[in-house]
Image (cartoon, rainbow, N blue to C red):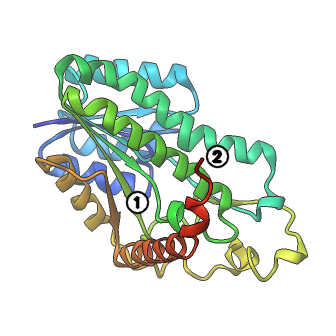
Amino acid sequence: MSTWFITGCSTGLGRSLAEAVLARGHRAVVTARDASRVEDIAAAHPDTALALSLDVTSPEQVTEAVRRAEERFGGVDVVVNNAGYGYRAAVEEGVDADVERLFATHVFGAASVLKAVLPGMRERRSGTVLNVSSIGAHVCPPGSGYYAAAKAALEAVSRSLRTELAPLGIRVTIVAPGGFRTDFAGRSLTQSPDPIADYAETAGPRRIENDTAHGTQPGDPAKAAEAMIALAEAENPPSAVFLGSDALSAIEGVLEQRRSEVNVWRELSASTDF
């Protein structure tokens, strides 16, 4: 039996993961900005679940939530940075305060959770970190530049963290989903308020009023939860996993295109040495 600390459990992948972890007999600290949104999960598992309010952009709340988790269960074995939401805007359309809030949640909030959990993991010389990214960090679709940038920043932090923690017995894996049938493209999706007409053909199709993907995504959240549990239980987990056939197809295309471009410009790249 292990103890999981999962952020962003009110809906979507976080809720599915919390339910699957508890169904397996593990303990779970189930968090959301409003704990009442996850009380039903805890009520179904009163001995092994703890529901907590947590806004990851508040370092004080993060510290208190981890303290209560350790007080209740004695330590965190698996931490899942899942809290987040979508933001769509052409780069020029982005509202500064909205972009800052996006990075505060996806990057700095995740870092706060890690800083609170890692001392206990280092002391025990064991633990697993699952940082939930997105295939968008690699595809970088028009209209999602800021969201892709926030997830790319989380991935860069994760890769450095993996190397830093490996000698201490702590594993780090990036989980990059494709499209899953959750509220992510519905209630959890935000966008800039004032579209610019010149971007109607590029960023415009991804605006909420034009997006028809919600409810038709190929990914099953319950299967994603099982995949994340398998990663946590793996003896030698990978640095990154792409969840969903769409994500797998997309990353293969991205890697092929990047390799081709590197080869085309190889001579110029090498020409800059002394």
Residue type (three-letter) at the residue carrying disc 1: Ala
Q: Quadrant of residue 255?
A: bottom left
**In the displayed structure image, the side of residue 75 where residue 92 appears, left or right:** right
**In the displayed structure image, the side of residue 136 where residue 251 appears, left or right:** left
**Within 10 Å of the Cα at label 1, are there few (<14), some (14-19), or many (20+) other Cα atoms?**
many
Question: Of all residues shown, which one is farthest toward the front?
Answer: 274
Residue type (three-letter) at the residue carrying disc 2: Leu
Residue 180 is situated, as x and y percent measured from the top left of the image, at 42, 70
Residue 45, label in figure: none
**In the displayed structure image, the side of residue 27 where residue 243 appears, left or right:** right
Q: Nearer the viewer, residue 92 or 110?
A: 92
Residue 77 is situated, as x and y percent measured from the top left of the image, at 21, 32
Between marks 2 and 1 in the image, the one whose residue lies nearer the viewer? 1
Q: Residue at x 16, y 51 (%)?
A: 23
Q: Residue at x 11, y 47 (%)?
A: 235
Which of the two discs, 2 and 1, labels the residue nearer the N terminus?
A: 2
* Residue 77 in sight from this viewpoint: no
Does 3 appear above or below 237? above
Find disc 2 in the rendering and name its residue: 102
Q: Nearer the viewer, residue 146 or 25?
A: 146
Q: Nearer the viewer, residue 113 or 33?
A: 113
* Residue 164 in sight from this viewpoint: yes
Does 261 appear above or below 176? below
Q: Residue at x 76, y 77 (%)?
A: 204
**Within 10 Å of the Cα at label 2, are there few (<14), some (14-19), or many (20+) other Cα atoms?**
many
Residue 51 is situated, as x and y percent measured from the top left of the image, at 36, 35
Residue 176, label in figure: 1
Question: Of all residues shown, which one is farthest toward the right?
Answer: 197
